Image: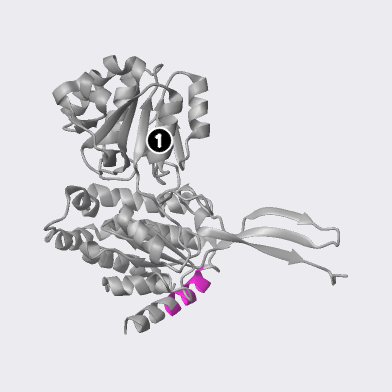
Amino acid sequence: MMTELLNSIGQQAIAAAQALAQLSTTTKNQVLRAMADALEEKTPDILAANQEDLADTTGLEDKFIDRLTLTVDRLAGIADGVRQVANLPDPLGNIDRGWTTESGLEISQKRVPLGVVGIIYEARPNVTVDSAALCFKSGNAVILRGGKEALQTNIKIAEVVREVLATFNLPQDAVQVITETSHELAQQFMQLNQYVDVLIPRGSARLIQTVVQNATVPVIETGAGNCHIYVDETADLQMAEDIIINAKTQRPSVCNATEKLLVNAEIAADFLPQIAAALANSHVEIRGDEQTCQILGDQVRPAQPEDWDTEYNDYIIAIKVVHTLDEAISHINQHNTKHSEAIITTNYEHSQQFTQQIDAACVYVNASTRFTDGFEFGFGAEIGISTQKLHARGPMGLKELTTTKYVILGQGQIRE
């Protein structure tokens, strides 16, 4: 029965994708702006559905509830993201390169949709909107399988989006939500190769690894964020404090929040008390290595080996004192999740070494890791933040939802 359900969803998605690939940019932008308006108009209905989901959050961590919760302001921001997607250039049809061969063949490499995109995600209703908007603009149909904790919200959002598609006489099945939340169906979805061209997981490290390990559909791995900030011995310490507090506390439940702080030994005695006081004001628990504990005393609890590899998504940070830039880089590359890393420094050579040697999708100099976000990068929204190295890396926008095909024009050439 479940296989029949997925086969039907898959067939409908393929038919919708074929129709979307033929749409003009003007039409797509009109539809997207109508989607944004409808999301705002239907805000009371969406928030009511969200309250249904929030009515039973027993056993859920605060960080999970934060991601699940929608507000008027959050919905307005989500709608604004859809409008930004409408304002972005359409990647479809762009020619990446073109040339003429010795035999006179005219070859061009052009951008085309991926086809059918599958998204598996947890309690993140914004993903429902972002995925629908980005996939629609890039000519892809999308199949959404969210967590049961956000089911009512996701159903309502998809209903709003599908109603807009219908008003433009477009296939509603361009956006489909799987309402069956069993693990068995999720497993089958991960192996729906005959219909799904690519699968993108969004959520915890556990969810992502489950998809990576069980899917037969090609996966773009979006990673957990064990993000670091290294404070160099030349750093402006007030700048460092401001960046660290923002990166840790502005929204600690998200993947681009900073989880680890490395401080050069030359400034540790001066800077650690300063940053500890600032973190305490924001109610952040500090876990430190031996030298950090010696400097801060009872302000910090000893870090355990597993702390260096943990994404807290909470008001917790681990601090380590390092003696050189090389030591900082080595520690980060050993323990990070290839997401976002930052250095605070006034030394140009140090900044260049850091950006060249750190293995991560996004590397910052004198800025908060919280900017690793499709909206902040100017993509309008994002389909996810890829931490792998093939096809796409970092925040994924419209271009990352396309592939290429070669178009070859001839005049009767045959190969000898």
Q: Quadrant of residue 234?
A: top left
371 is higher (above) or lower (below) than 46? above
Q: Taking the image as drawn, is residue 254 in sight?
A: yes
Tell me where the magenta segment starts and ends, as one range: 11-20
- Front one among 166 and 316: 316
* Residue 359 x/y as whole percent: 48, 39
* Residue 273 x/y as whole percent: 22, 19
Q: Which residue corresponds to the image point at 11% horizontal and 58% vertical from the top-left?
A: 58
- Front one among 370 and 317: 317
Q: Which residue corresponds to the image point at 28% horizontal and 39% vertical from the top-left?
A: 305
- Front one among 173 and 151: 151
Q: Which residue corresponds to the image point at 22% horizontal and 32% vertical from the top-left?
A: 287
Q: Which residue corresponds to the image point at 35% horizontal and 61% vertical from the top-left?
A: 210
Circle 1 sits on which residue?
A: 332
Q: Residues within 10 Å of mark 1 (few under 14, many from 20)?
A: many
Quarter of the figure with the N terminus? bottom left
**Circle 1 sits in a helix, a strand or a loop, which is it?**
helix
- Front one among 96 and 352: 352
303 drawn magenta: no
Quarter of the figure with the C terminus? bottom right
Residue furthest right as drawn? 416
Q: Quadrant of residue 368?
A: top left
Magenta part mainly helix, strand or loop? helix
* Residue 117 x/y as whole percent: 45, 65
351 is higher (above) or lower (below) than 2? above
Left or right for 263, reference 10: left
* Residue 363 x/y as whole percent: 45, 35
Left or right for 185, reference 26: left
How are the residues colored? Answer: one colour
